[in-house]
Each structure stands twice: as C-alpha cells, then as structure tokens.
Amino acid sequence: MHIFAIANQKGGVGKTTTTVNLAAALAAAGQRTLLVDLDPQGNATMGSGVDKQSLENSVYQVLLGLATLAEARVVSPSGKFDLLPANRDLAGAEVEMVGLEQREMRLKEALTLHNEDYDFVLIDCPPSLSLLTLNGLCAAHGVVIPMQCEYYALEGLSDLVNTIKKVHANLNPDLKVIGLLRVMFDPRAALGQQVSAELEKHFGDKVFKTIVPRNIRLAEAPSYGVPGVLFDKASKGAQAYLAFAAEMIERVKTL
C-alpha cells in the first residue's frame, strides 16, 4: 500500500482536482484506490459524487475513534474508488483532538488495519498547516505537491518543503517529496515557462513529466459530481491526469 498526501499550503492550486482525478485514473487503471478527504470543506467528497450532508460516518468519526475506517468508507459512484468522506464536522475535530494521545497519528493508525486492501491511498490535505494536515503527513510515505507555475508558488513551495523536513525529522522518518506536479499550466505565459524551467533546474527528476493544462472541462466536472477524467475523457485536462496516473504507477516501482 502506497500512501501519498497531496499537499500545498497555498490554497486554490488544484489539490482537490488532482486528488480526485488521480484517484479515478488509478481506479480506471485497475489499482485499488482509497481517497481520504481531510478538508472540512468536503470538496473531494462532492467531486467524487458523494453527498456530504447525508453521511452517517465520515473521517471525523474515524479520527476521534467513534467509527472504524471500514464503517465510514463509501464507494464513489462515479469514480469507482473508495472514499473516506468529509463534511463540516471535521472543522471541530482540530479542537477535539488536542487532548487525545498520539493526536498526529490517528489517521495512520486507522489506515494500518487496511494494509492489504489498497494499492494506493491518496490524502487530500487542507490548505493550511493544521493538525489535520499533520495527520495526513504522518500517515503518508510521500508527498505529491501540485503547483501553479507562477511567482508566488515558489515562495510557498520553500515553506512546504521546510514543513515536510520537520515532519520527517520529528514524526515520520518515511516521509519524502515524491514529486511536483505542474497544474493549471498556460503554455502562452512566459512567466509560466520560466517558473517551470526553474523547478526542473532545482528539483530535477522530482518534477513529474506530466503537465496539466488549464482546462474548463476539469473545472466543470465537480458540479456534476464526476471526476474530470470520466466527465470528458477526450479533454486535454483528462488526458493529462490519465498520463499522470500512469507516471505515478511507474514511479512507485522505484520507491
């Protein structure tokens, strides 16, 4: 079982789009996949076609020990992967977890029981360094960082890499950066090309070959509760995420 946190402290960089589409593309490629939604907004849950209002159990109950992962997981009707869903309840989990023992390890403990169930576990982390994100980073073997090729993105990236180093040193010695994924890419923008070249120079083969373009079909898909790779398979965005899934499957062989 390979567990990856999809993380970036900057909001609006396509984390959830990446997590949902990668999960659907991996499932379509025959990989047993679980998506864990760790964001109280529950966007990955809705984008997977699951109504977050009508959940009996969610990741909130799992983190607090009120339900098991097996009781809380559901199947994405559109994406055909397993989902540990989230809703607004999760916003209160931060406060309630403060007094718990091993509070950073709650997700890791829940996943340990399912080592044989999945090939890939993808964790959609919230855009802040919170106790929820920390649970994601402590449970993961590696971090996939989606990022836009713009000036501010590089600033945020150094913060995130420092955070990952700290978690690696203090809480999770297995944690490493698996790769950077360039998303919402506009090939016409000179700055985008410059930042992309900078990334390749600094991070070398840590930068995934796949580049996900800006794509209106990917943006429309969540409102239908269908991952973009299934909503319009022929779109450039869908093709990019299908290629990215294939690249991920190859990359884990070398880990």
Image (tube, rainbow, N blue to C red):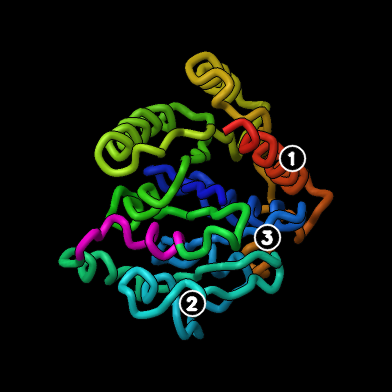
Q: Is residue 138 above or below residue 151?
A: below
Q: Residue at x 42, y 48 (%)?
A: 11
What range of the chain is rendered magenta?
101-112
Q: Nearer the viewer, residue 102 or 137?
A: 102
Percent across and percent down for residue 90 are: 35, 70
Rendering quarter of residue 186: top right
Percent position of residue 115, x then y: 53, 58
Residue to which mark 1 is pinned:
243
Residue at coordinates 67% horizontally, 59% vertically from top-left? Answer: 32
In the rendered structure, which amino acid carries the disc numbered 2? Answer: Ala
Left or right of 160, for residue 119: right
Horizontal and vertical percent position of residue 47 = 60, 65
* Disc number lying in front (1 or 3): 1
Q: Residue at x 68, y 60 (%)?
A: 227
Seen at 49% across and 44% down, the residue is: 13
Closest to the observer, 50 or 255: 255
CA gap, disc 2 and disc 1: 31 Å
Give SS at disc 1: helix
Which of the 4 quarters of the picture holds residue 117? bottom right
Name the foreground residue: 71 vs 194: 71
CA separation in Å, label 3 and label 2: 21 Å
Q: Is residue 188 left or right of residue 129?
A: right
